[in-house]
Image (spheres, helix red, strand yellow):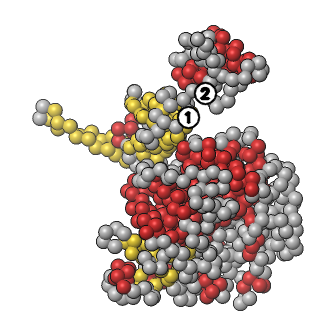
Amino acid sequence: MKNLAKLSKKLTAAAASAVMALTSTASIQPVTSAAADNNYYEALAMSLYMYDANACGSGITDGPLTWRGDCHTYDAEASVGDLGGSEKSIVDPDGDGKVDVSGGFHDAGDHIKFNLTIGFGINSLALSDYLNPEVYEKAGCKDHLIYELKWGADYLMKTTFLDGSGNVAAVAHVVANGGEDHAIWSSPEVQTYKRPIYWLTAGKNNSAVCCEMAAGLAGTAYVLKDTEPGYAEKCIKYAKALLAFGQKNVGNEGGGLADFYGTEAQYQDEEAMAQAWLWLCKAGDKPTRVPKNKDYGNSQYDGWVYCWNKVWQGYSALMYKATGEQTFADELKVELESQGDLKVGTYNADGWGASRYNCAKQMDAIALANGDKDADYAKAAKYQMDHILGDNSLGYSFLLGYGDKWPVHIHHRAANPGSDANGASSNPSAKYTAYGLLVGGDDKSGYQDQTDKYQYTEGALDYNGCFAIACAGIANLYGGDATAMPALAKKAAEINENFKFGSSSSVVTTETTTTVTTTSVDNGKTTTTTTYLDGSDFEMSLDRQKISVGDKAVLTFTKGANLIQFGNLSYDDDVISLTKKTDSTYEIVGLKEGSARIVFVAPTGQSKAVSLTVGAGIVYGDANCDDLVDLSDVVLIMQSLANPNKYGLNGTDKSHITESGLANANVNQQGGVTGEDALYIQKYLLKLISELPIPVIG
């Protein structure tokens, strides 16, 4: 019945896509129009299905998508080819001339596998999660994110061959000949053409590819370090080996790659990205490259946005989040302005696959907004995202499946295999909707919904990588409805609603019961106690989302405190300290500036996390510690003085003044906080005095 049900869904999907077929191929310049907020949680969750649409190997049948099946499984017995010497003995120890390079992701609407773009894709997914803590949990799709990260990371490690000392001997960095692949227009499930391997070795290396792979693996390790530490350690092992291999054997080998992704001799951006991730994983030193005015050292920047070949802006966004150092934000602003900037009312996108470049610029703008949804840059980024999601004169969402209208003449062989030998040139309509695939969309010249106009109608791993970063940022600022995507999955014929990615979804929870048995011996009598635990029955909360260095917050298990002794609680111990105070609470103290994540893994394996930010020490005038000095700070000071039981240091109200707030409020620097401090802050707001604190005289 399972297979019959899936076949029924496939047929329904094909019919639905045919009904959606649009025949317009005219070049039209969209003009954006005002609209209500989009559902950014839904768009983010949907975008992950793109990776399922491009999955390769075994384990696809009966997977997340009804219309995809196992494909290119014969990559598991690929020819070693012309690889020789000591590398061949490591890659092919039994000497049969075959090696397993199955799995991974197809790059775009074709079926070549490039480790460069797979590395960039999972690096970008990890970055989207790091820059926007808990957004995937809020959108109900963290388990899906982890599924895709591991699918990509598994392949990168499989195609990296280490010697007995743990050093890289060879990398199978491209699988399939692009020219031969592009000559065939059919779904991957039916293809049997020969798929050669292109190798990297010490004497014929590509440093950019190796370092991008390292970044993707180290980023995956960061996301999984608390919940799957063993897997994270394996990723770090391979990441460090690849980084060292790229640094030691510098090269720009282009075999199998250059006709599609022409890397350059410059690899230092991918190197810095990998180093930054390893530093965050506490597996390496802090990167030393600090940019200034479009120079990351030795003229290491050429003006490009964040993309498969240039990741400097991703590095700056990550380092700004990690350190709070203004120089990284200043650099992002300089670079964004030089690329046309982002403003409400103008969609800034040009070039082949323009939507990806627009999303990369959104990343810069969101970083500069720094969590303020009312900032001009936040509004500008939101405007760009709304354009991509359908708020344009065409009414098309360029994220396929989102909204009620999207292009269907898609340059994607799996979703649009066509019906004759002419392939793309006959302009077929897609047989299936590839939910979550970002296509190139419109640019300054307009848009053409035509299968062979692949600058507009094709998607790729790097497109969706950039989209994930942008959409996660917008979703983090403006939210959405996390129930929408699960509801759509039940209706969409292309999606297997019964597939389970894991147990971390905040929308769909699987109840799991386990037992913990403890044995004690007292006066020769043995007592055995069995405790039944519901692993999904716990909740954590913080009383404050931001504290200062030296300040305190409280973590409370509002439900399921009995699980603490059986589970695992981890946190960023270089940023905060954590001390248990009661059976259900922990005291948090800020140690240094940065972001801290606290993760609890229940004995059943389910995990939940909370995050907080540790800011600088004293910000004079900011009594309520919201990073602003305004009238609300004056109000809180007066409330704490008038009603200390409620608003004082140990007050009962959740918005009571804190130790950091008192330090910030003491603007006259004369003993404790008084009404005079509130008066000085009012004078500062009225511009009667120019600065805080008040200088101490004498």
Query: Can residue 185 be seen?
Result: yes
Marker disc for residue 26: none
Q: Is residue 660 above or below residue 606?
A: above
| Position of residue 559 in the picture relative to residue 450 (left or right) | left
Q: Could you tell me which residue is drawn at 74 percent across and 75 percent down?
A: 454
Q: Could you tell me which residue is drawn at 34 percent across and 87 percent down?
A: 95
Q: Residues within 10 Å of mark 2 (few under 14, many from 20)?
A: many
- The amino acid type found where label 1 is placed reads Gly
Q: Is residue 222 above or below residue 28?
A: above
Report the front residue among 40 and 357: 357
Q: Position of residue 220 (x, y in %)?
A: 49, 58
Q: Could you tell me which residue is drawn at 46 percent across and 39 percent down?
A: 575
| Position of residue 533 in the picture relative to residue 335 (left or right) | left
Q: Position of residue 602 (x, y in %)?
A: 41, 45
Dot 2 falls on a residue whose secondary structure is loop
Q: Are marks 2 and 1 in contact (CB under 8 Å)?
A: yes
Q: Position of residue 513 (x, y in %)?
A: 41, 47
Q: Quarter holding the C terminus?
A: top right
Q: Quadrant of residue 360?
A: bottom right
Marker disc for residue 619: 2
Q: Quadrant of residue 6?
A: bottom right
Alpha carbon distance from label 2 to label 1 = 10 Å
Report the front residue among 230 and 374: 374
- The amino acid type found where label 2 is placed reads Val
Report the residue that reaches farthest toward the front.
698
Q: Is residue 334 above or below residue 79?
A: above
| Position of residue 336 in the picture relative to residue 311 (left or right) | right
Q: Position of residue 200 (x, y in %)?
A: 47, 77
Tell me the residue that label 1 is attached to: 615
Q: Could you tell me which residue is drawn at 50 percent across and 82 percent down?
A: 198
